Every structure is written in C-alpha cells, then in structure tokens.
Amino acid sequence: MSHPHAPVIITAAICGAEVFRAQTPFIPYTPAELAAEAIRCYHAGARMVHLHMREDDGTPSQDASRFLDTMQRIRAEVPMVVQFSTGGAVGMPVAVRADALRHRPDMATLTTGTVNFGEEIFVNSLPMIREIAARQREFGVRPEIEVFDSGMIDTAVRLGREGTIELPAHFDFVMGVPGGMGASPERLDFLISLLPPGATWSVAGVGRHELPLAQAAMARGGHVRVGLEDNLFLSKGVLAKGSYELVEAVRAMAETTGRPIATADQTRALLRLAPIAAL
Ligand code: KMH
Ligand code: ZN
C-alpha cells in the first residue's frame, strides 16, 4: 500500500448516465457545461475527470465528437487527466461504448465483469472486455479497471496474465451500487488485499456512502472519486451545487488527514501516464 501521507488524486465523476435534471438542476449535459464543470473541479482539487456524454436534452450518449469537443475544451484550460467512460449506459453495444477511444483520452474505464445494476444488468462478458481492451491498446489509452464486485479484480489479474491488459494498473472500486458489492471499510480492506502488486486504487462510494468511503480511502493511502455520477448530496437533504462542491469536501478531508493534493505531474506519474511535457 502507498504511504498514508502520499499525494492523493481526486477524480471528479461529473455526470454519469443515470442522473437527470429532474433529480438535480446541477447536472451538466452539453460539452460546454461538462468542460466548465470539469475545470471548476480542477480548481477545487480534482486532477482527473471521468466523463460520460449526453445529448443536449440529457439522453445518455457515447458520441465521439462530443467527447472530443469536451476534452479539447478541458485541455485548453487545465492539465487534468481526461478519462472517458467505456461503460456508457446500460444496454449500449461495445462498438458504441468504445468508439471515442480513437480520440485518445489519457485513460478510459474497463469494467472486468457483469453486474446487476439496480433493476438492470451492466453486461461485460469476457469477449466484450477483450474487445474494449484491444481498442484501448490500439490507441494507447490506459485502462482504469472499474470494480463493482470483488471477482472483477480476479478477472483483471487473469486478463493481465493473458496479456489483454498491462499490469500494474489503476483500479477504481465502485461501492454501493444496488446489485454490486456493498460499501463499508471492511469490504474495502478485503478488496485492497486482492490487488496485484504495484496497483494504484481509488474508491467511489455511491449515495450516502460517498464521503465516508472517501475518508476511509484517504486513511488507507488510496485515491478518491466523487461527483454527481455517484451522489447528489453534500450532506443529508442538501444538494451539491456541482461535483466541485464534493471535490472541495474531499480536499478539506485531505488537509485534515495529512494527504497533499497531487500536482498534475505527480498525478500522471502515479498513474503511469506520459508526462505533460511529452504530450
Ligand atoms: N453507467 C454505468 C452503466 C463506467 O463509466 O465505465 C457504467 C459506468 C461505468 O458508469
Ligand atoms: Zn461512469
């Protein structure tokens, strides 16, 4: 495990595919709104943005030109790691989910297993995972392994052995999705115990678990993902006015825990990305 006072990377998951204006007026939809929110999150302390796309009316989308537009707007302003979702919304085919990888974001997600997702199923068969991973390799995009249940870590290790993904890798534990693993510090300790050598990891707690699990991750030397994709509330009954407010809350936690916010260069080094100077 990394040192408990090591720099922390905060990832902002700013829109996802399941949150709409009927639930919160603060969810961004358009590339301009998404980029503005990502930049606010950067200034609040986030060093990576996890992006989904929407049509202007909020319909979930994996439109490659919208991804590119958003990434270019962000990169013009801040040195933030840009991570595209390849999960998209439940039911999207792999060709749609993986299309935007050709625009070469720094990273993209790779979920290494199928999971019940509320009343639906987020399908990731081994052939689907291999296809997305192959496109990531083709375009030099580093995966973030999305883990919704513990077996997904074991699968990632097997995929590493067969050469489908490069290990060590960065893992994100999404904890508290109904149908996936629950959210608790004890489960987090178990997940950490399964990681292959050299892995880095973050935690995304869903709903009311978001900030308590951020604190648990911070205390264990891990990294943290927060944002409206995972949780709408800053405190009980109080909507966050944007993902940036959740990032600010984690930044305050980092200060009291003695974890400095990673610089842009430290972030890229920790995630094994090319330095900014080489871009
Ligand atoms: N929207 C979920 C079905 C990812 O971004 O890679 C999948 C998801 C994971 O959010
Ligand atoms: Zn996502």
Image (cartoon, rainbow, N blue to C red):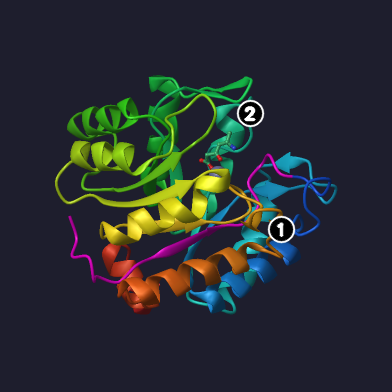
Predominant secondary structure in magenta? loop
Q: Amino acid at mark 1?
A: Leu
Segment tinted magenta in the rendering = 1-19
Image quarter for ligand 1 equals top right
In space, the residues marked 2 and 1 are separated at their CA atoms by 29 Å
**Residue drawn at x 73%, y 56% as measured from the top left:** 27
Q: Nearer the viewer, mark 2 or mark 1?
A: 1
Q: Is residue 189 left or right of residue 234?
A: left
**Could you tell me which residue is drawn at 45 percent across and 53 percent down?**
212
* Label 2 CB sits under 8 Å from any ligand 1 atom: no
Query: In the displayed structure, does residue 117 sit left or right of residue 269?
Result: right
Q: Is residue 60 above or below residue 5?
A: above
- Front residue of 13 and 100: 13
Q: Name the image quarter holding the C terminus.
A: bottom left
What residue did someone put label 2 on? 92
Q: Is residue 101 magenta?
A: no
Kind of residue sitting beneath label 2? Met
Q: Which residue position is annotated with label 1?
A: 239
Q: Position of residue 246 (x, y in %)?
A: 57, 64
**x then y, percent, for residue 167:** 21, 44
Q: Position of residue 144 (x, y in %)?
A: 39, 47
Quadrant assignment, res 268: bottom left
Label at residue 269:
none
Q: Residue furthest left?
A: 197
Q: Residue at x 64, y 20 (%)?
A: 119
Query: 107 or 11: which is nearer to us?
Result: 11
Which residue shows up at 67% across the image and 49% down it? 53
Q: Is residue 104 visible?
A: no
